[in-house]
Image: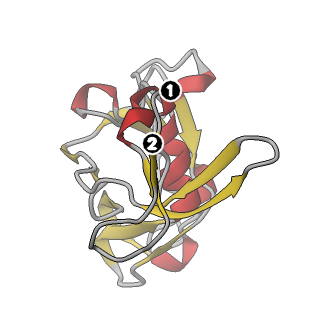
Amino acid sequence: FDLDLTRDVLLLTFSKVINASTLNLQQFVLQGTFNATNLRNSYTLTAGAFSLNYSTQVTVYLEHSDLNEIKRLNNLATSVSNTFLTITSAAARDMNANKVVALVNAATALQVTLFTADTIPPQLVAFSLDMNFGTMVMDFSETVRTSTFNASALTLQSTSSTGLATEQVTFNY
């Protein structure tokens, strides 16, 4: 399998032609090690769109909620070395309705073949400021690591123009 976190795509390759309408993404688990004993480093997919072609390859377009959870986990899907997949036999069927062979944790978990890291920086999409409580809530386009947040790089200004602001506040955190 291949995982591209820039394009939000999981490419699955099977040994036989798969009836894509039988694909059950809730039976797919991404895990950070071959033998995932720590559930904090694994994630079960919940949803996604996928190609309905009858082929040995199925392209899964990962849901935003799944991507956010995957990116939130420190030791999962950050490189080839911590990207493994397990599936149950209920994950898919071939064109003769035969169940797929399970990929079992610590026995047959499959390591990613081609891994592409997320190279698109998150964007601030909205924020709210509460002067009574002295709090600001920021909404980003994807999960961000709070440890990388630099409040001193944050500036509030009274206008949205690209010219000079009449008033601005820079935070020293």
Residue 148: % across, % down: 39, 31
Location of residue 161 (image quadrant): bottom left
Residue found at the far right of this picture:
132
Residue 147: % across, % down: 45, 26
Q: Secondary structure at mark 2?
A: helix
Who is closer to the viewer here, 160 or 124? 160
Residue at 35% x, 84% y is: 53
Q: Secondary structure at mark 1?
A: loop
Who is closer to the viewer here, 35 or 131? 131
Horizontal relation, residue 124 to residue 114: left or right: right
Residue 6: % across, % down: 27, 58
Q: How many marks?
A: 2
| Residue at the spot of label 2 | 71
Residue 125: % across, % down: 49, 66
Marks 1/2: CA distance?
Answer: 21 Å
Horizontal relation, residue 136 to residue 43: left or right: right
Horizontal relation, residue 119 to residue 127: left or right: left
Q: Please report whichever mark, 1 or 2, sits nearer to the chain's N-terminal start.
A: 2
Q: In the rendered image of this protein, does residue 160 appear above or below residue 91? A: below
Who is closer to the viewer here, 145 or 102? 145
The circle drawn on residue 105 is: 1
Q: Identity of the amino acid at label 1?
A: Asn
Q: Identity of the amino acid at label 2?
A: Lys
Q: In the rendered image of this protein, does residue 148 appear above or below residue 33? A: below
Residue at 35% x, 62% y is: 8
On the question of residue 90 being in view, the answer is no
Residue at 35% x, 40% y is: 153
